[in-house]
Image (cartoon, rainbow, N blue to C red):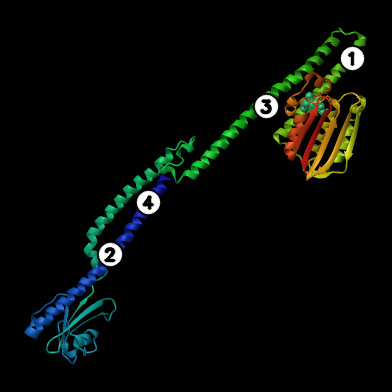
Amino acid sequence: MRNKIFKSIWIAAISVFFASLLFILGISYSYFTSIQKLQLKNQTELAAKGVSISGSVYLEELNPEGYRITWISQDGTVLYDNQANSEIMENHLERKEVMEALENGSGSSERYSNTLTEKQFYCARRLPDGSVIRLSIVQAAVWTLLLGFAQPICIVIIIAFLLSFFIASRLARKIVEPLNNIDIKNPEMYYGKETYREVEPLLRHISEQNIQLKKDKDLIEKNALIRQEFTANVSHELKTPLHVISGYAELIENGMVRDEDIKPFVRIIREESIRITKLVEDIIDLTKLDSGVVDLSWENCNLYSIAENVIESLYSEYTEKGISVTLRGSSSPLKSIPQLLYSITYNICDNAIKYNRPGGYVEVNVYKNDGYTILSVKDSGIGIEEQYQDRIFERFYRVDKSHSKEVGGTGLGLSIVKHALLILNGSVKVESSPETGTTFTVSIPS
Ligand code: ADP
């Protein structure tokens, strides 16, 4: 970058220098020409005086360098010319400067020579006897001027090159230095400072990036902590049923259980195995939702039919407890992910049965409201005290751990609901009181 700034400054300086040089040369040339014309006029005056005093003798003795002198009679006949044979020269009466001189006393003109390569300046003066003295000179060419200035111009060019090189490299360093000195971690401290005014948008951008990086870092750390806690919880949750299974199996193996007790012991082993299976299934579901690796597709589905299927699959659970389950509402089609809708409905209805009182009821309602498809599940169960209502969506959080275990809970059902709703852009609301029971209301945009 420093190199680029240096080159830009240097090229700009050199360009300005050459443009100025050309301009100055142009002005000098026109000044030079005006001096030449003035000299021609003075020389013409002198020659006119000389001829009027001494006649043609004056002209013959005169040997002016660079000037051409012509003496023309009143009728235009050339009487004398220092560069050509006057006798064969044509009549000069028509020449502009001669005509002017005859009329006004003096005249001037400029013309290109026959070859058109050089310009001639003419100046004429009428003498008292009516004849005209005319002097002419070739305009000095540009290169004559350049040649005269060659040495100083070369010196100025060399100095300009060196000076601009030195200044450009210093300026480039001065521009880049403050940028290199910026403390990228604290760009805010340069806001409003004169030196950094032009790069303030960049500094603000860096600051935003820093904030974003910090947020990302915090999130990564938080996620790592959650994962750590989750792993610890999983091991803990698995350990208990595994201990039970191995303990009972060992007792049976060592013949320490009476024959009539073997059946209940085996039942416990089976129940604990089912718990482990359910736990592992829930963990797999939750991990899939969490990592986003699930291959789920959005399809046309119907929440009412899904609720029907869920209730059907929970039939043995609620009839065992003498709970009545009713489904109200009507066909509720929506574009969504059926597996997730099933999982949400299943976990909420399963809880409504699990945490219900014997002989209680569950009312499931599916309806559309204001662009949302609503699933509400009301139970007549044990309810959830207000202080726990936010926490029940946390992983492995159970209001009453032993009761949850008793009814086959893993503490992951509502976490799965929360994660599934995140994917579907939906939300869930809990209303509950320990006396009357709980209502979960799920809203899914449709
Ligand atoms: P679990 O597998 O233990 O049911 P969940 O994540 O589904 O785990 O629920 C978390 C906790 O929330 C449960 O342990 C229970 O204490 C409470 N809970 C959930 N649903 C209900 C409900 N319908 N009635 C009373 N308590 C509930």
Q: Position of residue 170 (x, y in %)?
A: 34, 45
Question: Disc 3 or 2, which lies upstream in sequence?
Answer: 2
Q: How far apart are marks 2 and 4 (CA)?
A: 24 Å
Circle 4 residue:
9
Asked if the residues shown at circle 2 and circle 4 are in contact, with their CB atoms under 8 angstroms apart, the answer is: no
Q: Is mark 2 on a helix, strand or loop?
A: helix
Of the 4 image quadrants, the one containing the N terminus is: top left
**Crowd band around label 2 with a 10 angstrom C-alpha radius: few (<14), some (14–19), many (20+):** some
Identify the residue shown where x is 24% and y is 85%. Answer: 96
Res 154 label: none
Circle 3 residue:
227
Amino acid under disc 4: Ile
In front here: 60 or 232? 232
Question: Disc 3 or 4, which lies upstream in sequence?
Answer: 4
Question: Disc 1 or 4, which lies upstream in sequence?
Answer: 4
Q: Distance between the residues labelled 3 and 2?
A: 80 Å
- Asked if 275 appears above or below 252 in the picture, the reply is below
Amino acid under disc 2: Leu
For the residue with label 3, is its CB less than 8 Å from the closest atom of ligand 1? no
Q: In which quarter of the image is ligand 1?
A: top right
Quadrant of the rendered image containing residue 98: bottom left
Q: Distance between the residues labelled 3 and 1?
A: 37 Å
**Crowd band around label 3 with a 10 angstrom C-alpha radius: few (<14), some (14–19), many (20+):** few
Circle 2 residue:
25
